[in-house]
Image (cartoon, rainbow, N blue to C red):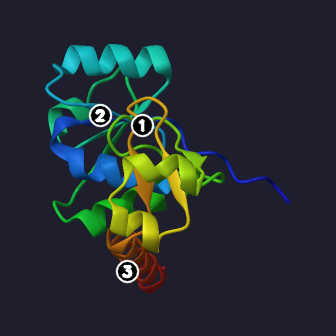
Amino acid sequence: MDKPTEPPPLLVDAMLGRLCKWLRLIGYDAVYANHWPDAQIAARARAEGRLVLTRDRQLSRHKAIHCLLIDSQKLTVQIQQVITALGIPAQQMPRCPQCNTLLVNATHEQAKPHVPQYVWETQSRFTYCPHCDHYYWQGTHWQHVQSTLKQVQENRKQNL
């Protein structure tokens, strides 16, 4: 049986900032091109072999780069389109939603000075970003992420 192919690294244009953060949480390597001109997006995509995600029809027709035109404005539909087109990363290692760096595990004690007291007392698993030194835990926001991803999966099954 063939090993599933890994999705390409992504370059997400300014129209899709919220989608970019969600894709990073799922494990996609996604660079955010906030306020970049099309020429800079194209140059970086070519240099790094990145697939451009865009809602810009003109950019999506750029001959020198590979693009996925995102049709919807609705986040769950956008996530579903990306997963359908590219698959889910085999190594679902979450990335920092702010800077795209792979998150690493942190001990309970390492997290203590960086998280609110209540969080430290009620959570046992923490990750952090070694680039921006931000700590993460699976609180109520993570439940929302899981709920949204479940909705995306259910929608995919209905559309198959």
Q: Compute the Cα span from label 1 to label 2.
A: 9 Å
Q: For the residue carrying disc 2, how many other residues have a C-alpha within 10 Å: few (<14), some (14-19), or many (20+)?
A: many
Looking at the rendered structure, the kind of residue marked 1 is Asn
Q: Which residue is mark 2?
A: 32
Q: Are marks 3 and 2 in contact (CB under 8 Å)?
A: no
Q: Which residue is mark 1?
A: 100
- Which one is in front in this view, the residue at disc 3 or the one at disc 1? 1
Determine whether the residue tagged by mark 2 lies in a helix, strand or loop.
strand
Q: For the residue carrying disc 3, how many other residues have a C-alpha within 10 Å: few (<14), some (14-19), or many (20+)?
A: some
The residue lying at 32 percent from left, 59 percent from top is 116
In front of the other: 100 or 14: 100
Which of marks 2 and 3 precedes in the sequence? 2
Q: Is residue 129 above or below residue 131?
A: below
Looking at the rendered structure, the kind of residue marked 2 is Tyr
Q: Are marks 1 and 2 in contact (CB under 8 Å)?
A: yes
Q: Which residue is mark 3?
A: 151
Looking at the rendered structure, the kind of residue marked 3 is Gln
Q: For the residue carrying disc 1, how many other residues have a C-alpha within 10 Å: few (<14), some (14-19), or many (20+)?
A: many
